[in-house]
Image (spheres, rainbow, N blue to C red):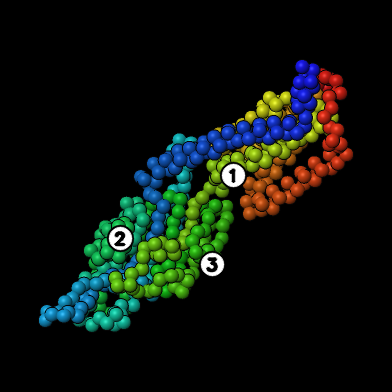
Amino acid sequence: MDTLLKIFEQIKNSQFVRILLVSFLILVLQIPTVMMQGLVSDRQALRQEAISGITTKWGAQQKVVGPQLVVPYIKRLQSSGNAPRSEVKLGIFLPQTLDIAGVMDTETRYRGIFEVPVYKTALTLRGQFQRPDLSNWGVRPEDILWDRAELALQISDAHAIQDQAKLSWNQQQIAFAPGQGKLGGNVGGNNPGIYASLKNQMNGNAFKFEVPLKLNGSERLTFAPFGEVTKVNLKSNWRDPSFQGLWLPSDRSVTDKGFEATWNIPSLGRNYPQQWNQDSPVGQETIQASVFGVDLISPVDNYRMASRSIQYNFLFLVLTFATFWLFEVTVQLRVHPLQYLLVGVAMSLFYLLQLALSEHLGFNLSYLIASTAVVVMISTYSVAVLRAKQRSGIIGGMQVALYSYLYVVLANQDYSLLIGSLGLFGFLAVVMYLTRKIDWFNVNRTPTLPNEPPS
């Protein structure tokens, strides 16, 4: 019996066993980490529902593709019989020049605690088409159906058009009709938009057009570079734009009063020509891949920040528990596994506090409040666990360093790997320095430190 008690005592005091136990507790504490990731996803989904409730009525993300000139023609087919055969095909032609000028008036709408940026925009599309040349396709002039030509303009959320837009075509006013027209639907699929019939309006070698357009939208506004040279000038009172697409603005200015951006895009940079037909079509996915524009994003996405911060929970638990364990080894203290667990739960609670507060106070303030609360809680608790205010101060200082480090990592995403690597290297160097004189072969001794009351 005495032998069993000695063996049990050796196991109880074994630092190797304690390391295994602490490692097990860290793994157990990954359960609330996974639950927190799920909570972040649920809150993101709830936010997206709120956004959809606003944008469905006001206007969704707007994508303006066009204008494009659709000209039908007769394609004559060889026939083995006596009767000739023919069918109607469509040619699609893009403008020689396309200039877009727009002003976005933005505001923030709320659904509960969630917010979404929305805008009213007044756009003017100007440019010129050259008279289409179909001779390269072997089409005879008399087989071109000029009287059935149409001008189509795709708008991703056409229900948000705010006025009865009219096309100025060589100074002739032509009313737009809803949809992609009798011909445009064959090339634009089911994409919503507007079209104008150009019957009796295709006389001449060049056609100047102008389309004034007032749209409501939210979060994003993008365009397709349909001109041989496409120029876009966009002004807005939104102060935090995020420019998207294959092309960034050639000139931009962002101030506290808003932004102004200008794009100059040559057709050589995109992956489709100035004209094509149904025999060699250009897919909608190719066109959609070429769009560019601006996102009206918030400077800080609280849910993305919360999701990124949770990823560091495992590392923080390892570093904090390792510090407590170093106190056990260096000053012969004993920290109960339940005390490790309570400290770990307090650290996991930080992410819940930060997420909940950020929905009301924003990321920066909520991070400060949550981290301060957790640091104070763990530092105060450590006074009793480590039996000295000085040791508790070391734990508190380390917690401050950890949460300060995390904030720097979150604020500098591009340098997060470098910062993380340097931080781990520094911690390992400190551990090696503090434990350099420990006799690891004779470390399992009974604690000699008296049970002092907290000083």
Of helix, strand and loop, which one carries label 3? Answer: loop
Q: Amino acid at mark 3?
A: Ser
In the picture, the quarter occupied by the C terminus is top right
Locate residue 320, reporting x and y percent: 72, 35
Label 1 sits on residue:
308
Q: CA distance from mark 1 to mark 2?
A: 39 Å
Q: Residues within 10 Å of mark 1 (few under 14, many from 20)?
A: some
Mark number displayed over residue 189: 2
Along the viewing direction, whichever of 450 and 8 lies nearer the viewer: 8
The image shows residue 254, relative to residue 225, as above or below, that is: above
Which of the two discs, 2 and 3, labels the residue nearer the N terminus? 2
Quarter of the image holding residue 254?
A: bottom right
Along the viewing direction, whichever of 273 and 385 lies nearer the viewer: 385
Mark number displayed over residue 116: none
Label 3 sits on residue:
250
Q: Residues within 10 Å of mark 3 (few under 14, many from 20)?
A: few
Which of the two discs, 3 and 1, labels the residue nearer the N terminus? 3
Q: CA distance from mark 2 to mark 3?
A: 32 Å
Question: Horizontal placement of 86 versus 61: left or right?
Answer: left
In the picture, the quarter occupied by the N terminus is top right
Locate residue 13, reporting x and y percent: 78, 27
